[in-house]
Amino acid sequence: MIPIEVYLVFAAVLFAIGAYGVMVKSNTIVVLMCIELMLNAANINFIVFSAFTTDVLGQVFVIMTISVAAAEVAVGIAILLNAYKLKNTTEADSLTSMRW
Amino acid sequence: MFVEYTWLVPLVPMLCFVIIGFFGKKMPHGGGPLAIFGAMFAFLISALISYEFFTSAAYSSPGYVTEQITWFSIGSFDINIGYYVDSLACLMMLFASFISTLIFIYSIGYMHNEGVKRRRYFAEVSLFLTGMLGLAVSSNFLEMFVFWEAMGLCSYLLIGFWSFTHPNGDDASDNAASAAKKAFLVTRLGDVCLMGGMFVLMYEFGSLDYTAVFDTAAMASVDPNMLMLGSLLIFGGVIGKSAQFPLLDWLPDAMAGPTTVSALIHAATMVKAGVYLVARCFPLFAQNPEVMLFVGVIGGITAFFAATMALNNMNIKKVLAYSTLSQLGYMFLALGAGGYMMALGLQSGDSALIAAGAVGYTAGCLHMANHAFFKALLFLGSGSVIHATGTEDMREMGGLHSKMKITSITMLIGSLSIAGFPLFSGFWSKEIVLEVAMHAGDYGAEGYLFLVLWILAIITAFMTAFYMFRMWFMTFKGKPGHGAEHCHGESPKSMTIPLIILSVFAAALGCIILFGFDDYVTIGIHAGQFQVGSGHGHGFMGWLEDIFLSAYTYLTVALVLIAIGVAYVMYSKMSINPGKFNKDGNSLLYKALSNRWWFPRLYDQIGWKMGYGVAKGVEFVDTQVIDGTVNALSSAVAGSGDSMSKVQTGNVRDYASVVVIGIVVLFAVMLLLFYFMGGA
Amino acid sequence: MFFDLPFEIPYLLTLLLVLPLVGAVATLAMGGERQKYAKYVAGAFSGITMVLSIMLLFVPDLAVYNESYPWIETAGIRMSYILTVDGLSILMVFLTGILVFLSTVFSAREHDRPHYFFALILAMEVGLMGVYMAADYFLFYVMWEVTLIPMYFMISWFGGPRRHYAAIKFFIYTHVASLVMLIGIFAIVFGAAGGGIADFSFEAVLAGSAAFSSTFQTLVFGLLFFGFAVKMPIVPFHTWLPDAHTEAPTAGSVLLAGVMLKMGSYGIIRVCLELLPEGAQAWQTTMVFIGILAMIYGAYACIAQKDLKKMVAFSSISHMGMVMISMACLSDIGIQFAVFQMFAHGLISAVLFMVAGATGHNIGTREIPLLGGLAGKVPVLAAFMMFGFLASLGLPGLVGFWAEFGIIFSFYEYTISIDMIWLIAFCLISLLLTAGYYLWAMQRSMFGRLTEKIDLSHIHDLSRPEVIALGATCALIALFGLWPDLALGFIKEYASSLALSLGVV
Amino acid sequence: MDSSIVTSLYGEFAPLAPMIILMIAALLMPAVYYATKLRDAVTLVAVAAIALSMFFNILMMIDGYQGDYVGVFVYDAFAGVMILLFQIVALLTAMVSLSSSETTRAHYGAFNSLLLAATVGMMFVATANDLITIFLGVELVSISSYALVAMKRKDPRAAEAAVKYVIIGGLSTALTVYGLSMLYGVTGTTNIPEIAAALSTQDFSWAFGIALITMIAGYGFKIAAVPFHMWAPDVYEGAATPVSMFLGTGSKKVGFVALFKIFIVIFVAASTTAAFATEEVQYIFAIIAAITMTLGNVVAISQNNIKRMLAYSSIAQAGYILIVMAVMSEYALASGMFHMFTHVFMKGGAFLVVGALISVGIGEKISDYRGLAKRAPFIAFAMLLFLFALAGIPPLAGFTSKLFLFSSAIYDGGLGGGVMTQWIWLAFIAVLNSAISLFYYTRVVKAMLIEKGETTERIKVPKTFTAAISICVVFVILLGIYPQLIMDFCADAASALFGI
């Protein structure tokens, strides 16, 4: 059996990749995808813990997270569209009119 | 029956002050008659009080009448208010109120042209008199101090009477304002010392009442060092008030005020307060020979220095001012020398020495009384001259004798008296002063100092005669100057009558020493306590023998006559040009004298550096360092806000980076915390 | 007192607090067309308040008037509405009543938005009365802060050219201090609670203060002391004061110097000394040191000032240094005369600031170098200036002298006890310096050469209301100077009992 | 009347009663708008729903109702108080949205729907007893508010703000979920009391540490604690002012509620069994609190846009409330909750004033406020009160609540500890910050009351704004002089939370 640490490290790496993406990517669509990546890292954690403790709550949580993530992306994409409509760009580097 | 009403003595002039102050505008002569009434009333009631006191049983024992009520208390120390009448107080009351009355009468004429300002003048002089009379009858140091300061205030106000809208223009206003300030500040320096002395006494004796402080047993039980400190501090107050060395500089400047004010300050009030205080504190000072030695030395030095400064001054009032300083020095010399002997006598239990010391006391007081009259006379006379000529410079006078006979003759009497011409008032007291000074030289380890002082005093007597007659000759004899040509004759009656009255006293008052003055104004130990009065003086013949059988008397008289002669040939006959002796005013000595030995410049420098110089530094520290820190702090906060807001770049990637970095940092902090705090 | 009030006034202390508040609102309502009535409304309310505060002096037993009602009681905290007046506060209440009314009278000619102006004065009175009467730390602190806001607006609405800077500086500086003080109050209140309900009333805290350890006392004393010292103000935390005074309108300055600064020293006595005797002993040397520093420093700073009002402001610092020294003696005389000096300086500084203010608006400038020889033009103003200066420099027979005399004497006792008698010289030097800067200022501004640097055609002497206000204050100065027991009698008992609890008599 | 009305109406759903009403209303909103095309009607329904919900909640609170729904939703005193707070926020927002010129016109029904949905999410968090429900509640709030921010008419700044908000929000959601998953892994359960029980027998572990930090980050985003605060100024500035107010006063509190729920329960349980040191975590919160309040206040000084300034001041206020997490005492919690309440009225009031003025065409710059006292005396006076209350000037609400809050760093609420010395430094930083805050509040005061404006033309502010501002004024004064009105409830709530 594969030890739990492997799953956790996998999830952590996934999470880190997502976080890195959020930090460096200027394209906000990509950033949203990176966030999805991070969420899924957490989901993997849940599943793994759930599997190793034979507790069903973790899986419930995962389903909730997936639906929340879906809603979030939906709203997010809508917001990006709105931004594109008003500002003609969705690049994070260009959306800096409010600062200081 | 009168003594119980002693409080009226200062109160009536006080009421005059209030009434004139508020309603003087509508009164004739700006309230002058009311002021005269107040002074006269004070004189009358003090005469009655004195008569009653000297005939009462209290005079022989305990030698004083006192009554007081508690005013308020400082912790467990009661501050009282009341009166204290003894021979000294009677003497002070009498001559102060009498001379003030005459000066006030004189002022009616002298201040005739001042218009509405007269209200202020008469109000302030009434307050001045209140101060002096209150001082004389106070029953404790603090009450005395109140009046003492009231006089300081009045001197400030009156010296600065013309400190704005001076009839002679703006420069004179400036001068008067500056002189007034100087007078107040210098005397304030002394007052501050006096206050320190009062703290010492209050702490050591638990009270400031004369009866408590001058109690022999109390004084013996107090730490002698503290007693000496207290005495010296009190004498510090005297130095300021009576303009003794080294605080003598304000008095000549104070001539900026009206001449009548100078007369008041020099004759009746203010500077006499210092002499009074030393006489009053005689029992206290006499606990330490060193203190009395100090008093004597200060007096002797002042007498000499002030006389030198008068030698070449051209301002008639300033000559008189220096002469006042010099004569005050004599008084302190007498008191110091007498006190020195008394202190030694108290230490050794030698009653003859104590009696010899009492002579010094008598001499000081007699000279004070004499001086009051002849100095009032001289100032009023000079006022009359100034009134007539419109100048104070003696070079512009001259030859006035023919135009102002009364003034001239009365001033001659005054000059003879102050010079110590035989049988005039000044002669008697000055001779006794010199005798006491020399006598003190025979005793104690530091006694030789009094011999030195005696020599200085003899020289001073010579100089006194010289500069007084220099003044008289320059003014009334010789060629008429620029100002003298303006003179239209004698001053009005209100001015000449006081002069005549004063000249009588200036000529003859001194003889009272022959008629038992030293029975009344003396100090001795009766029943273990100090007592003023009730003494056994030398008597008529005693004094005559004392004075006229002494070779030193003739030495002095000879010096005085020589001095008058020299002055005559120099300034009346003009056969010797005074310029020969001083390279026409270019010799170092001449310059030193006319610059008052550079005292004013020294004081100005010290005052400026210690005052304004330090103040500039403080101001710099205040605005730059302290307030600078405050402002720097606030701008640092605001500035860091500015720079910290720059982190907010507006780019969401940076925001995310901050979040992630924040997490990493937080994690590190947590690990550190767990590591250092030894958590689970 | 020689005369007892024959009847009782119900809720007297609350009235003292509510009347000005109602007055402030009523005055504020006098906007627009009714502006010219604002001063009468304000005068009426402050006048009645003043009468009540004078009546308070004749009350035979002050304890009758204590008021105590529960206020906030929640989550382990109890705060109450308690008003008391005792020997320490009665003079301050009296002073507040008098000075508010007189500054209203003095400002009767205020034409610029008078309803705001007088409402602010009355609002300030609420806070001041509250501070002096509160016997609950919560109420005390609330009132303490309430005084800030009217003053802030007073300076920023009616002040001089640099009013914004001065107002903000005043506001923030003193607010920082009060917040530090608040922490100190937390410490004493919660320390005294000892684990039970935290009762903010003075009484409860005093009862619980027995348990304070000496380290605790020392630390907390520092916190509270800082808070109060800034208000006093004490060098080096004083720089807000000259700026505030320079810019504030006359009435504001009068209240600021006359009553508000006293809040600081009042607080030190009321809170620090009453509750933390061991802390006081630990801090005694420091207090003496900064007291001397403030006294000398303030006096020197006065010499260098060019603005008459700023000079007077620094003289306040110098005189409050004297109060500090006096309190630092921790003796009955020291405390008695510290309070007396607070009272005396309240009256005197009122005169000084009125005079300085009048110089500003009657002559047109307060810059001393621009003035000169004006006594002939404005004799009444010059006379009052003279009187004020003389009172402040400690002329015997006026109220300031007795205060200074008692203070220096108590300090003398202290220096004897620590065997450093030479320290007394500092006090004496400061007296001398005080005389120096006042007379020099007088000489330069009113005496000497008539100035040519300003337009003399618009100069006018004091108006009638100004004369009345100044005259009344001067009369009080003389009255209490001739009869100091009139005021000292109130403080005596309080001072000796406090000194007893401090362990030094 | 008592809570039996609620229980008889709702049966076993009684603990959820306030939420159910709002949920139904939220779903009805678009329908009402499409049916009537009247924005007034929509607002009326929304306000009525909130009022009804509030009425039920107050009944339940006063009655001390307690109950749970299948163990994941628990209504207790704590939940009641927090729900009341969220209802007040929703009420104010709904009222002013009607007349604000910034809120959307075309999708007004949706706007209100989202508003109510977000409120329901907040209430969920308040009643939640399980990580899942907390998570769901917070997400409901977040997602609704992303949309609310974007729903400002034709304003590119709003679009930009929404983008930033959604990205940082998404990031923090991910962080939260990751933390929750770790916590789940460590304890094997998502039920909060069970987590506490499980943790009390454990040592500190790496996994728990990661859970801790990521959860702090996730909820720190909601409360805008440094360094997770960067979105707040931009979003507050960009969003419609009623929405800014909703975020600043309501959404922020959700984060706190979640923190209280998770951490206090965990740590109190843990500290009583003493197998697990909480002090280190308290220090982490203390550090965050100190930095948050300082940064918020200092940066606010340099702001010229009043909404941005209020945003930073909001960050600072979050720092103050974080003192609760550092001290973690019952008294601190009560004080913190009370401060959250007063904050609603002070900060909410200030935002309302800004919104009202924007609606009548006055800009957002501080300099635009010059001479306001002449133009709109009541508004200027109200703003003065709000700002002074925020600065903590007595006798206003902000002073009293700060007094309680700061004192909680020193005082344990009469539990026998006397003076606590551990957190005095935090109290010091807090009071100094309070003084710094005067700097920028007085700038606004100066502009409004002291400086002269270019015009003295009177301003007529919409009625709903005036009404909402009046409510805030009343409570800012009332809570200042009579704090037990709310503080008593807060104390009960705190003891309820600590009692778990």
Image: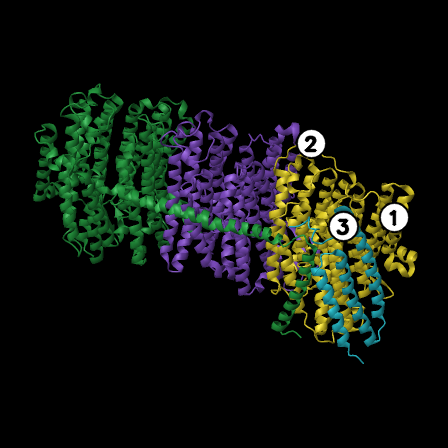
Q: Secondary structure at mark 2?
A: loop
Q: Is residue B358 above or below residue C100?
A: below
Real-space CA distance between mark 3 and mark 2, rounded to the nearest whole angstrom: 31 Å
- Callout 2 amino acid: Glu
Q: Identify the residue position indicated by label 2 in the image.
A: D457
Q: Secondary structure at mark 1?
A: helix
- Callout 1 amino acid: Met
Q: Chain of mark 1?
A: D
Which hue is chain C drawn in? purple
Is residue D290 visible from the viewing direction of this image?
A: yes
Is residue C136 visible from the viewing direction of this image?
A: no
Is the residue marked by circle 3 packed among few (<14), some (14-19), or many (20+) residues within 10 Å? many
The percent coordinates of residue B222 (x first, y second) are: 32, 57
Left or right of residue D142: residue B48? left
Q: Viewer-proximal residue, B96 or B321? A: B321
- Callout 3 amino acid: Phe
The percent coordinates of residue D126 (x first, y second) are: 79, 59
Q: Identify the residue position indicated by label 3 in the image.
A: D246
Q: Identify the residue position indicated by label 1 in the image.
A: D29
Left or right of residue B218: residue C253? right
Q: Chain of mark 3?
A: D
Q: Viewer-proximal residue, B321 or C109? A: C109
Which hue is chain A drawn in? cyan
Q: Earlier in the sequence, mark 3 or mark 2?
A: 3
Which hue is chain B drawn in? green
Is the residue marked by circle 1 packed among few (<14), some (14-19), or many (20+) residues within 10 Å? many
Residue at 44% from the left image edge and 50% from the top image edge: C294
Which hue is chain D drawn in? yellow
The percent coordinates of residue B454 (x first, y second) are: 15, 46
Q: Earlier in the sequence, mark 2 or mark 1?
A: 1
Real-space CA distance between mark 1 and mark 3, rounded to the nearest whole angstrom: 18 Å
